[in-house]
Image: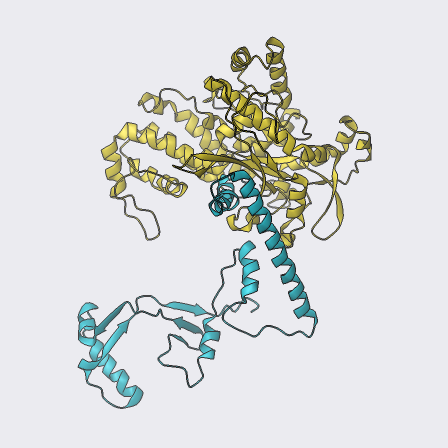
Amino acid sequence: MLTPEYPVKQPLHLFYCNPINCMQALLSHPLFKPHISFILRKVWTCAARVCRVYDEWLSGDRAWSLQVRLPLLSYTWRMTPSQEALPPGATLLGAVLSSDKTNISVMSGNRVAHPVLISLANIDARIHSKTSLHAYLLLALLPIAKFTHKSTHIRGLLQDRLAHQALNIVLSTLKTAAAVSVIMSDPVGNLRYCVTPLASWIADTPEECLLAGTGPTASPVTIATSKHFSDPHRHPSRMAEGTIAAICTACSKYSPNDYKNFLKAVRMLGLNGVVEPVWMDWALSSPSDFLTIECLHHFHRFAWDHDVKWCITVMGTTELDYHFSIIQTLVGYRAFDEGISNLKQVTGRDHHSVQCYIIGAVAGAVPRRFFVALRSLVDFRYLAQVLMFTTHSLDWVARALQDFHDNKDAVIYHGARRNWELPKLELLQSVVPRYLPIRSCDAMEC
Amino acid sequence: MQWSADVTEHAHVEEIKVPTRAGNNQNYYSQIARHLDRLDKCFRFDLATYIKEHNHAGTADEVFVEEDHEPDTKKRLVSEYLTPICFITNYFSISSTLLHPSTPKPFRTFVTSTTAFHLATKPSLRLTLAEAAVKYQLPKLAPAISTFISEQNSSTVPLDSIKLQIWHNVRVQQKSYHNGD
């Protein structure tokens, strides 16, 4: 039972499990036993340590830096007296959370559920990414309230706050475990001191904004605002402290319960009006780190929503449909005999296949620089999807994105777009720095 | 590590949509929670009994389950829940069980020394010999078949009465020599 801060139509119930129990269930699962690892590692392609390989979460730099910081943490974060007892050999257990709204019933009531799923980043990536292995457990069902307030904007604000309020309750044990560590048994049966930072939160763009506490005009992971979404470089990360400071500024101007004025104040600061974000007292976790890019929404949806629209604008509907209809398709590949401009109920599978053909379909029919921009964006997507990055392949990814930014003015010039206020475009900048943060620091120190 | 929402979107189906459909469209959240709880208990029970049985069979006197081309149902229940194992039917073993003289002929599964073939129940086409020769543009088909038949059982059959069953697809299986089994 949850008490919201404003009257609602129906009483709210929050259903949740203890996240520590969920993680323990995954950890002691007999069938995941051979696929769970705890050892952090740095992998190179050869002994000369030139080309680094990034595949699992544990081989990344972020996990490494977290483990290095662990003994320090016990010193700096004096949250409880038992903090000093944190052993240097604590184990990192990365929590993976995911939340997304999903429709339960269409046509009859349009009910929506807002589930939060939990998983473990220590499970191998190839096991983790199998859909049929039940690596994700249902952690909580966030309540969806019907507030009695008249204004839609304020109802949205209240719903956002409610989501964070509920998440705060659900994840409180996980936060404690991240700060003071918890004893859990590993698949072999040994007890380990486990620290649970948040490895990743898989969500689509609106959900990421909700979590990071940013408004629609600001990026959830960097300090860029809508005017700067198209900049060809990455803005500095949005640190947790910065967002909290901005929230405090807004709170000092107006009381958070003065919804109308408070909403105006937070809009100016690019926030969404959440006062106590869920990551506020979560050690080792900051939104710019755990909000990771994910393929489905940020690549495939982006391609469908934008790239294809640009092509339609530049080439015209009939021409593009004709080009698609005469493509010779191999057995096993999707054929678009009717063209693509009036497809309905397009699924992710179709997004994939349109991306396969789009370059071939528009080649020669669009201006050269527009084509280069499109092509480099497609290159970028394919390169960034690989399961295993190396230092070289990250260079290619960065170069493909740079090519797009060099040529993107052609898209505007040919009238396909008026501005570049695309949050997803800004998020693409975060792919490479996620893997290479340490290297850039080294370069600065040298 | 690459994160993708594909998996989580798929997990929604199992964790939310299936339990929802099992309910009566009232009080969604509590019914989903109860459904998943019970499912989890059932799964744990299955798993525990499976492990128990497995240990028992392994330690008692090394009695293994007899070779059967239908996998054990209980084993399948547990493994289907958690592992995406594609069960490989062993056509070699099926063919060896067919060696019994009372089995009806012709076989749909047959082996050479290295390769097993398996035909579907229904052929793609049923044609007479003349029709087949026209359809596949093989003028020498009829003489070839008559030679084959005479070689096999040294009696001539009138060519008009021969009906052919033609399969366009067959399943071919070969033994993997580099794998342990």
Quadrant of res A445: top right
Quadrant of res B140: bottom left
| Relative to A295, B146 lies left or right | left
Q: Residue at x 20, y 81 (%)?
A: B161
In the rendered image of the structure, the colour used to display chain B is cyan
| Residue B99 vertical placement versus A191 (above, below) | below
Please state the horizontal and vertical placement of residue A175, each as a whole percent of the image.
68, 32
| Relative to A164, A232 lies left or right | left
Furthest-top residue in this view: A253
| Residue B166 vertical placement versus A419 (above, below) | below
User: Dividing the image into 4 quarters, which one contains the N terminus of chain A?
Assistant: top right
Please state the horizontal and vertical placement of residue A436, each as a whole percent of the image.
59, 33
Which of the two residues, A190 or A150, is positioned nearer the viewer here?
A150
Say which chain is yellow. A
Q: Is residue A37 visible?
A: no
Furthest-bottom residue in this view: B154
> How many numbered marks are there?
0
Which of the two residues, B146 or B67, is positioned nearer the viewer here?
B67
Q: Residue at x 47, y 79 (%)?
A: B97
Please state the horizontal and vertical placement of residue B90, each as a whole percent of the image.
48, 70
Q: Is residue B20 visible?
A: yes
| Residue A236 vertical placement versus B167 (above, below) | above
Q: How is the image coloured?
A: by chain
Which of the two residues, A160 or B162, is positioned nearer the viewer here?
A160
Please state the horizontal and vertical placement of residue A111, each as a whole percent of the image.
46, 35
Quadrant of res A164: top right
User: Dividing the image into 4 quarters, which one contains the C terminus of chain A?
Assistant: top right
